[in-house]
Image (cartoon, rainbow, N blue to C red):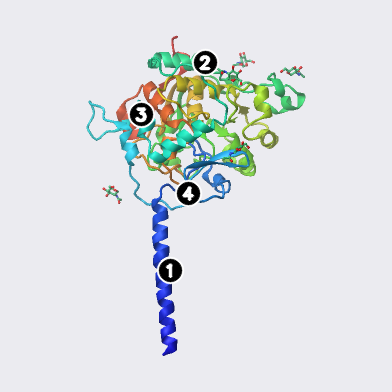
Amino acid sequence: MVHVNLVKKWMYVLLAFLVVLTICLWKETRKGYYFSLKVESQTEQVHMTLWKWRIPKQRNIQDKAVNDSNKVFWSTKVSQVKIKDNISGTQAGSNLVSKPKKLADFIKVWNKDSSSKNLTPRLQKVRKNYLAMNKYHVNYSGLRNAAKLSPEKLLCQLRERLNFQMIQSSDGPFNTSEWKAYLPRRNISMELGQLGQCAVVSSAGSMKSSHLGPEIDSHDAVLRFNGAPTKGFQADVGDKTTIRLINSQLITVEEQKVVTDPQYNTGTLIVWDPAPYHANIHEWYRKPDYNFFNSYKHYRNRHPEQPFYILNPYMQWQLWDILQENSPEDIQPNPPSSGMLGIVLMMHFCDKVDVYEFLPSKRQTDICHYFQKFFDQACTMGAYHPLLFEKNMVKHLNQGTDEAIYTLGKVTLKGLRNVQC
Ligand SMILES: *[C@@H]1O[C@H](CO)[C@@H](O)[C@H](O)[C@H]1NC(C)=O
Ligand SMILES: *[C@@H]1O[C@H](CO)[C@@H](O)[C@H](O)[C@H]1NC(C)=O
Ligand SMILES: *[C@@H]1O[C@H](CO)[C@@H](O)[C@H](O)[C@H]1NC(C)=O
Ligand SMILES: *[C@@H]1O[C@H](CO)[C@@H](O)[C@H](O)[C@H]1NC(C)=O
Ligand SMILES: *[C@@H]1O[C@H](CO)[C@@H](O)[C@H](O)[C@H]1NC(C)=O
């Protein structure tokens, strides 16, 4: 008898414990987003896996920027969650779309006047925190949307104010005989030649099931980002890679993978690194965001035949200034996304650029990458990068139709060399 009572008691205790646990877990998952940090754009393919172990330990810190060995990360509650099959547009997403009059009512595409007010409270807070943090010491004092430029004027600004050069052996700290052996001998214009029709393929989750592969591969040149794979995804993203734009974090933190994975060994590589605001090459060389120079050399030793360039540090902030000038509010004082950098690079090299899923199509999803199962709204809306404002600009410059955005996620931009200024 005594025995049975004891067992019963324990059963109740166990049951109560389970109930409490269930309630706690349920509350946790409702608190918000699952995965967020120095969150990258759809196209900003910092491997999410790469971030996992860099996430600060303070798991309960919510919406608060924290230092992690002097690097600033964005941390919210972190847990990996398997994606549900059916994630549809979010509320903030639907605030950000406009209904073009001419088209059927159901077509909704990015509104070029989207403002930070359209962001969820969490992402609004993130933006404010980055503004307060000002990691790159931005002291911008120029215009703010004095008059929104026409697309033609904006194209001229991009053409005239952006420095599209890669680091050369005549550039300051790179003018040693050692660096001369590592930097490609031919400049990138010679290497690529004048390109005609180009495609920029974002790594957004919405590339999945797009069946855009053949269309993408029909372009003369294709730019991809970071670790975005083609193998196994050809039907949706195509097979051709002419340029791969990678960030310094990827090559530094995943050096071994980048050096050995054959997918990086196709086409021309360009690496970029966030620099202090308008730093010159010397200042940047002393204080890169990620000290990728040895990894770069390592890669060059292993693949000496492949053209591999280092983007000059000027372009990112020249582009940032133009984004800020054309936005009515303060944009995040962090460099533009790889996505935006890749877009303007291709506008420089090509006659015409089709950009896929930078502006979300009807397949819009919070899944960050077509090849991974993480999701976060920040991947579409931006947290670290001023992605919202980049998208406004790209929408403003679009020469294609809203229908193409809606159905294909496709934006068509004019090559800068064809712009009359
Ligand atoms: C972050 O790091 C910087 C520089 O190391 C330091 O000055 C600052 O106080 C730190 N902030 C927090 C919130 O720990
Ligand atoms: C996905 O969700 C939408 C509405 O949220 C619903 O209409 C649709 O049937 C769902 N699809 C699947 C496959 O569950
Ligand atoms: C911004 O900072 C730089 C370097 O710290 C300085 O040279 C420049 O004058 C500053 N500009 C403004 C507008 O304060
Ligand atoms: C490298 O460039 C610096 C200026 O940026 C110059 O002072 C130096 O003499 C140059 N060194 C060589 C070896 O050309
Ligand atoms: C690239 O190199 C070629 C030949 O060496 C030269 O004519 C051209 O001006 C260079 N282009 C740039 C952008 O430096």
Task: Work out which quarter of the rendered image holds the N terminus and state it.
Answer: bottom left
Q: CA distance from mark 1 to mark 4?
A: 23 Å
Q: Amino acid at mark 3?
A: Ser
Front-most of 86 and 31?
31
Within the displayed image, which quadrant is ligand 3 positioned in? top right
Q: Is residue 285 above or below residue 366?
A: above
Q: Which mark is residue 77?
A: 4
Q: CA distance from mark 1 to mark 2?
A: 63 Å
Label 2 crowd (10 A; few <14 / some 14-19 / many >=20): some
Residue under pointer 1? 17
Residue under pointer 2? 161
Quadrant in which residue 108 is drawn: top left
Instruction: Tell me residue 160's x, y (percent).
Output: 51, 13
Is residue 67 toward the left or the right of residue 124 in the image?
right
**Residue 50 seen in the figure:** yes
Label 4 crowd (10 A; few <14 / some 14-19 / many >=20): many
